[in-house]
Image: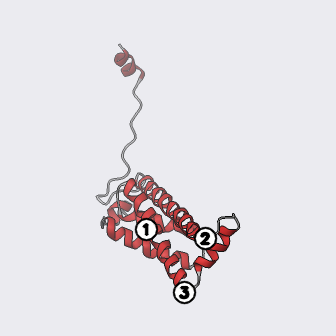
């Protein structure tokens, strides 16, 4: 088995974003908001930079939740429910604020999931052998006392 980054191809930012959106919608329909961390981490598989991994998770989950809220606003009166919740705080008529805050929280979950996933993939790659058959890079050997003495002088 090779390294994770050698096995999974780099497909670019936009395809990784689409993959994150799809997994975000599927995981949200499963009914567990905590799975957004995994959706962001899965999207981070396809990019190599940690900033892009955060952006893929953040934007992917933000767009996924926005699409779901638009659907719910059209079919299930999500704005009426949001107005009830914001009314509990004494802010009548700002139901969209509840939706914006919910999307922002979901986006942060996805972004931090992407960040954590990318960091985990890079950490695990340090311990996996590469495809060319070489094992982990050799550890540096401590210098002998004689060599240290000559270096100090």
* Pointer 1 local density, CA inside 10 Å: few below 14, some 14–19, many at least 20: many
- Left or right, 42 with reference to 6: right
Residue plotted at (34% across, 65% down): 7
- Front-most of 66 and 7? 66
Which residue bears the numbered disc 2?
Answer: 93
Tell me if residue 64 comes above or below residue 3 in the rendering. Answer: below
Q: Quadrant of the N terminus?
A: bottom left
Q: Looking at the picture, how far across and down is residue 93, in whole percent?
A: 61, 70
Residue at the extreme bottom: 75
- Front-most of 17 and 85? 85
Label ID, residue 75: 3
Mark toward the viewer: 1 or 3: 3
Q: Looking at the picture, how far across and down is residue 74, in whole percent?
A: 52, 84
In the picture, residue 47 is in which quadrant?
bottom left
Label 3 or label 2, whichever comes before in sequence order: 3
Label ID, residue 60: 1
Q: Separation of disc 1 and disc 3 at Cα?
A: 23 Å
Asked which colour scheme the image uses, the reply is secondary structure
Q: Looking at the picture, how far across and down is residue 137, in whole percent?
A: 36, 46
Q: Looking at the picture, how far across and down is residue 8, in whole percent?
A: 35, 66
Label 1 or label 3, whichever comes before in sequence order: 1
* Pointer 2 local density, CA inside 10 Å: few below 14, some 14–19, many at least 20: some
Mark toward the viewer: 1 or 2: 2
Q: Separation of disc 3 and disc 2 at Cα?
A: 20 Å
Secondary structure at badge 2 equals: loop
């Amino acid at each position: 088995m090779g390294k994770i980054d050698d096995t999974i191809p780099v497909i670019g930012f936009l395809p990784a974003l689409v993959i994150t959106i799809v997994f975000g919608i599927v995981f949200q329909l499963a009914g567990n908001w905590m799975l957004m961390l995994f959706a962001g981490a899965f999207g981070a598989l396809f990019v190599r930079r940690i900033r892009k991994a955060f952006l893929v998770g953040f934007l992917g989950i933000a767009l996924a939740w926005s699409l779901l809220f638009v659907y719910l606003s059209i079919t299930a009166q999500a704005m009426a429910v949001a107005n009830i919740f914001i009314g509990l705080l004494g802010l009548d008529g700002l139901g969209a604020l509840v939706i914006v805050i919910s999307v922002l929280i979901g986006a942060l979950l996805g972004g931090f999931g992407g960040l954590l996933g990318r960091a985990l993939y890079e950490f695990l790659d340090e311990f996996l052998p590469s495809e060319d058959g070489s094992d982990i890079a050799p550890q540096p050997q401590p210098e002998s006392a004689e060599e240290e003495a000559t270096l100090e002088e």
